[in-house]
Image: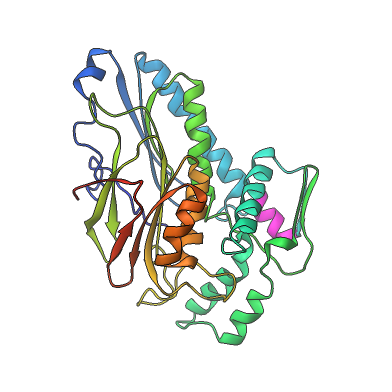
Amino acid sequence: MRRRTLLQTSLGLGLLGVCPAWAGERIQEAGLQWRDRPLLGLGTALSLRVAHRDPAVAQRALDAAVVTIRHVEAQMSLFDPDSALSRFNRDGVLRDPHPDLLQILRLAQTVSQRSHGAFDVTVQPLWQVFEAAQGQGRLPARAAVQQARARVGWQALELAPDRIRFTEPGMGITLNGIGQGYAADLVRQRLQAFGIEHALVNTGEWAALGQPGAQQGWALGVVDPRDEQKLIASLLMDGRCIATSADNQTTFSSDCLNHHIFDPHTGYSPPELASVTVAARSCALADALTKVMFVAGMRRSLALARQWQVDVLLVDKAGRWQASDGLKLLQA
């Protein structure tokens, strides 16, 4: 899956407003040294920014963060045919799964259960049927979509410490809807273990530590899915993680009505929303909930945000947007 970065720093492409004064006077007085590490991974362009008084510690922390990202890819990437997830999809069973793979699948199952199946990592057969049809310059026939949908169902994924397996044939998993957020959570924990107190982690979704300057926190801007040079709004991270999904990230039709986010109940993309941004304590949860909110639509998502104790910014196909009260919005 090709991923576009919907949130960007002002020091990058200028599409996402990180506060320009990212190293404030008080942090400079404390003697912190900032170090950056751009890299490719998880299907997109990633970036890591950390501060520490000892630049050698900052570099070691960045090295460890990259190792963590490569570990996530080795376990969960569909781009790597030798990853644990690719082998599981081929064989239908994986023995002695890594604890991280088991943990993310258990979180996915929890979100699936609580959302009544609106989030489901077993939608991979739908992705495959749409991708195959796109290769022929068309959309898949309705019968093909329904056949693929019959092989989707989170209840048919059996998890145990010594084995994970499908209980039905022809199934497949994608972690593209939660894996980038999970990677951000792991990287943030790894940086903290090195004593990093100020950092911005971009694994395709966003997590932060501390703050970029003396008076302000990390600020992100949400890109208009119909004009990537325009911001819908900017918001403060306030210690929480931010994840965004949009209908123009990977499309199967030029009108963005058919894209990489599927409603598992219908087999097709949800029709109302164009972009969903979620702020949550866990980046993996924020990542997964963007898909739940896509399926729910504008009105129901605002109520669901309260139930999940998260905040959301929702943009519909016409460009109208709403945000829940807990988001700290700045002028775009």
Q: Residue at x 27, y 13 (%)?
A: 31
Is 294 positioned to the left or the right of 313 in the image?
right
Of helix, strand and loop, which mostly describes the magenta segment?
A: helix
At which x and y percent is residue 266? 57, 76
At which x and y percent is residue 308? 51, 50
Vertical arrangement, residue 88 with respect to residue 73, above or below? below
Q: Residue at x 52, y 46 (%)?
A: 284
Q: Nearer the viewer, residue 291 or 60?
A: 291
At which x and y percent is residue 51? 34, 23
How many numbered dots are placed on residues in this image?
0
Is residue 83 something that shows in the picture?
no
Vertical arrangement, residue 4 with respect to residue 203, above or below? below
> What colour scheme has been applied to the protein in the rendered image?
rainbow
Vertical arrangement, residue 146 with respect to residue 306, above or below? below
Q: Nearer the viewer, residue 123 or 41?
A: 123
The image quarter in which residue 258 lies: bottom left
Is 71 positioned to the left or the right of 48 in the image?
right
Q: Residue at x 39, y 21 (%)?
A: 58
Magenta range is 84-91
Vertical arrangement, residue 309 with respect to residue 118, above or below? above
Is 16 positioned to the left or the right of 253 in the image?
left
The image quarter in which residue 252 lies: bottom left
Q: Is residue 180 magenta?
A: no
Q: Nearer the viewer, residue 56 or 52?
A: 52
Is residue 289 something that shows in the picture?
yes
Q: Residue at x 34, y 68 (%)?
A: 316
The image quarter in which residue 263 lies: bottom right
Is 7 positioned to the left or the right of 125 in the image?
left
